[in-house]
Amino acid sequence: MFSIFTLVFLFVNGVDSSFVISNALGDHMVLKKDLPLVWGFDDPGKTVSVSVDDVTEYTNVTDGNGVWRILLPPQPVGGPHTLMFSEQGTYIAQLDDIYFGAVFICGGQSNAQFSVSGALNATEEIADAINHPLLRLFTVGQGGGMGDTAPLTNFSSIEQNWTVASPEAVGNGDFSFFSALCYFFGRDLQMSLGEPTVPIGLVSSNWGGTCLSSWTPADGNAAIDCGMTGTSGHANLYNGLIAPLTLGPMSVDGFLWSQGECDADCNNTAYYRCAFPRFINDWRSRFNVLDAFFSFQVLPAYVNDSNRFNPYSLPYERQAQLLGLAAGGRVYAANTIDLGDALAPHGSVHPRNKQAVAARMTAAALALIYGEKTIPYASPTYAGASASTNPTTGDITVTVQFLPLPQSSGILTLIPSSCPVGIGGLPLSECSWFEVQTADGVWRNASQVALSSDSKNLVLTITGTDPTAVAIASRGFFSPWPVVVLYSQEGLPAMPWFEPMGM
């Protein structure tokens, strides 16, 4: 859908034209300040011009596929501005209330789609939206999305055109508009950067219950190298819900991604391990920002409520997600294993504390995009482990080391927690703490958990084993419901791990 002004001026001026502005654009939108690109459609060879506030025109010629693209020079942060369009020198349309700032795309399945109305403190959060007028929102529709077998050039449906943040724009049903994770991230980032002077545009494009392959370009490396086997859907959601944004492509500052439950449910973790890093770089390439910030959510604790997968598919999926870091550059894993919500109204698979997820992603964006040097954003991450066995008692001691953390003291903290067994139907078997595997193949829970004298290492003790027992592997938080007790001093939970000893 293009601006109403396009329709009005085509009629009033009597212009016989195929000119259309991409329906990914519209009144009230935000364009990336240093790469503001607009695009649309017309007859091949037609000359299209754009001016900002009717000052200087920037021109290009519609290509052989009927697509015109115009990249404006970098613009000062702010607005409002009017973009005025001409075809063959004749004024034909305009877009109003345009701002220049930062733009982010948010995608994934139901926890990305999960709306502000379902989040914690929803009533207050919805009411507060009136205070963020330079937060601009766009929600892609789901009409036809599951049946798109080839990349679309324009969206077949739009749930919410570009609009100013308001209670009405963010409070429309628990899985409608607007994405809670996306909104809280944009709001927190804007306030951190000096609201209201920094406009932020947010594009929400999500579909509940969908696997990674549905979002993967069919001709990309993830599809080619990883085979797209054993998965539900091949590229259909990319074709319908993302490809129209890449036609320009829309200039973006980064991506937020919350997905993986579907692949755990369908035992697709082997595919995910191969595909996820390639998927990240495929998207970066399609949007022509090879070093774009890409933040993904490491799945939180939730109850296995399907009999289709094995008990450990969820922790294996988390390990597969972490391989996304191999994409390199400004990739961030937002660890949320501590945010389990056993009594969530839509099931524990849909925890309500989206504010905490967004806050972690915001901290990473401030550090990795905007160069903030003092904001801690990384979770303690396994670096290696060593073990020894007491030949008299048979006690095994395992010392787990962690990678240096940027913007952090490196100090670890143990915070007591327990398995919420029985709450929300959670069985004890789905909880985990720290375990050590011995050479006989048996996994044993740590009898004692402590920190080293400098509080930078974790010390696990297994009591009463055979004095000849040898530890060969360790794992932490490796179950559907991790009982998280280990944090950085700054309050970020340790990443789950499953590694052979010494690795």
Image (spheres, helix red, strand yellow):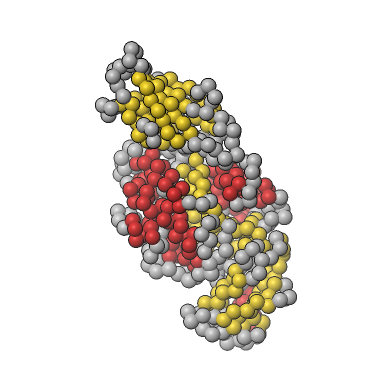
Q: Is 3 displayed left or right of 482 in the figure?
A: right
**Residue 271: image location, x then y, percent:** 34, 51
Q: Residue at x 33, y 37 (%)?
A: 311
The foreground one among 345 and 308 is: 308
Q: Quadrant of residue 225?
A: bottom left
* Residue 99 found in image quarter: bottom right
Which quadrant holds the C terminus?
A: top left
Left or right, 258 with respect to 95, comes to left
Q: Residue at x 71, y 50 (%)?
A: 194
Locate the N terminus and report the quarter of the image it occupies.
Answer: bottom right
Above or below residue 389? Residue 275 is below
Residue 41, placed above or below residue 429 = below
- Residue under the image location 31 percent in, 24 percent down: 470
Most foreground residue, 338 or 70: 70
Q: Where's residue 427, x and y in %?
A: 37, 30
Residue that sits furthest to the top in the current view: 392
In front: 141, or 318?
318
Q: Position of residue 428 (x, y in %)?
A: 38, 28
Q: Is residue 286 visible?
A: yes
User: Which residue is drawn at the image coordinates 71% and 63% (left, top)?
Assistant: 76
Q: Position of residue 178 (x, y in %)?
A: 56, 53
Report if residue 345 is visible in the image: no
